Image (cartoon, grey):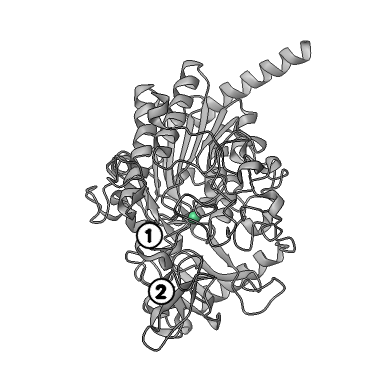
Amino acid sequence: MILQKTAQIHQLVLLVLSCLIYHADCLPNIVILFADNLGYNDVGAVTDTSGNFSSLTRTPNIDKLGQDGMKLKNWNSAAALCSASRSALLTGRYPVRSGIFPGVFKPDAENGLKSEEITIAEYLKQQNYATSIVGKWHLGQREEYLPTNHGFDEWFGIPYAMAGGSLDNHLCGFDSNATIWLPLFEGTKIVQQPVDLTNLAQRYADKAQKFIERNVANHQPFFLYVPFSHVHQLCAPQQNSCQWASKQFSSDSPKASFADAVEEMDWIAGKVLDQLDKSNVANDTLVIFTSDNGPWLAEQSCSGSKGPFEARWFRDNVDPDCTACPLDYIPSPTEERPRRCVFAGKEALYQIDGVHCGEDVGLGSYWEANIRMPAIVRWPGKVPKGKEIMDMVSTLDVLPTILNLIGVSPQVDLDGIDVSPLLYQNATNTSVFDDRILFFWRDGFKDGPLPAPWGRFDVVAAKLGNIKAWFYTKSAHYNADEEVLHDPPLIFDIISDPAEAYPLDPKEHWHTIQKIIKKVEEHKGTVDWNEPLTLATDPKFYPCSNRNAHCRSDLKITIEAQQ
Ligand SMILES: [Ca+2]
């Protein structure tokens, strides 16, 4: 009893101290809004400095967030794909250190994010935060790897990407027996399979709003992580709609255009932000919005755009015969249709034209379209409103920055850095960031210890200041073009040349190149990548609500049924 009391007093003293030290109200709430495969150019707030809508999509809520917060215009994704990027966000460590490579966790993955990894949610839990995730997890679908075993009190969402399971009219290529339906989880239970897309956004919004409402009523600091299931495309022969939204955003719901899907995602964000206002905690809440990686450009109209990040040098230098196909399609050129792609196993039914590999420079690659993320940080009264910064930051930095905010030291070595000086002050001295270097690891090599098509995992590019150095160039990792070694590295000034059109003369940047090479070697020396966790799969691990009903659930939850 005495011990318990002492511990409580100790905690209180720490809390008061942290308030004094950080000049912030005690323990702010934290909300992370994390889009899936959303490009920099797909959000009005980021592309348009006036804050008006972009030409493609209407994102009034995210635009408003951008106006009220800070836009970080040189925010870098930490990895080329979903699982790895999410691991980096939640742990502050390069995914290669956590074994989250190559590719992503498949729906029948044996492994997931290991229990010894310490997530943001676990750190916050230790500080008595309530923690919730609403949306896509993608760090392992077996019970021991689910969010509720990684520091989250509750979870409502889908364990992987929207292309991780079939839906009616959307049979995945890997689901020839029609049993692998896309599941919706609550905690550790499947509550619907396949998920009903006509009201998923509404249910996500309800869960998030209720979580905020409940915790504000309880005077409980909270961490809400909303990894949207939007705007990842569905498993789809492309003749069917490959995006989805409710009736509010698509008259033919759940069929939808890419713009409909973006707009519905923005609507969920708006509901979360509305609730912060309604509950009167907007000023006590740090909100971060960004995307896990860039657009899946091989998916063409189902995908976002590369915007100014055209990778022009690469487009003009890669094998002109290389074709990039959408998911489940493989190149099958004919004389008349040199870019023909066929749906594997159902060639007669589904054929479409792919794109030149030089255009496939988003998801799965490290061209700027897949690195530079739309990013906003809002905290009224703490983070300057309407400011835009070009300092190089990374998704890796979210965890260390939050730890600094709550006055907690990391329990392991981190790759991310605390970027508080950029956020909270009118920083004039940011020299701490001058030597900042980011490393970009990718698979897709012709040879290596990993099974094809991965080959090996290696640092293919690094960024130091404005300079990006390429050691190996390639389109998205799944394409047939072989990696090209550059020695000396191919270098671009990605601030003045975001299209990566004009390689710089290595002789003029020799000092920087040498510095980058040295840092890459040092970094690689600290990484042991012998344990790829994403490869082991077994059909018995497919989430299945009812084996007697071919893994379909009878439970139908619709807005109409609830009313
Ligand atoms: Ca993604």
Residue 515 vertical position relative to residue 382 in the rendered view, above or below: below
**Residue 174 appears in view:** yes
**Mark 1 to mark 2: distance in Å?**
13 Å
User: What amino acid is found at the position of numbered circle 1 in the picture?
Assistant: Cys
Rendering coords of residue 461 (x, y %) = 54, 70
Q: Nearer the viewer, residue 244 or 21?
A: 244
Q: Quadrant of the C terminus?
A: top left
Outermost residue, bottom side: 335
Sequence order check, earlier mark of 1 and 2: 1
As drawn, is 535 to the left or to the right of 238?
Answer: right
Q: Secondary structure at mark 1?
A: helix
Q: Is mark 1 within 8 Å of ligand 1?
A: no
The residue that appears at 42% across and 43% down in the rendered structure is 197
Residue 442 picture quarter: bottom right
Residue 529 bears which disc, if any? none
Q: Which residue is mark 1?
A: 302
Rendering coords of residue 62 (x, y %) = 33, 43
User: What amino acid is found at the position of numbered circle 2 in the picture?
Assistant: Gly
Rendering coords of residue 441 (x, y %) = 59, 66
Q: Which residue is mark 2?
A: 354
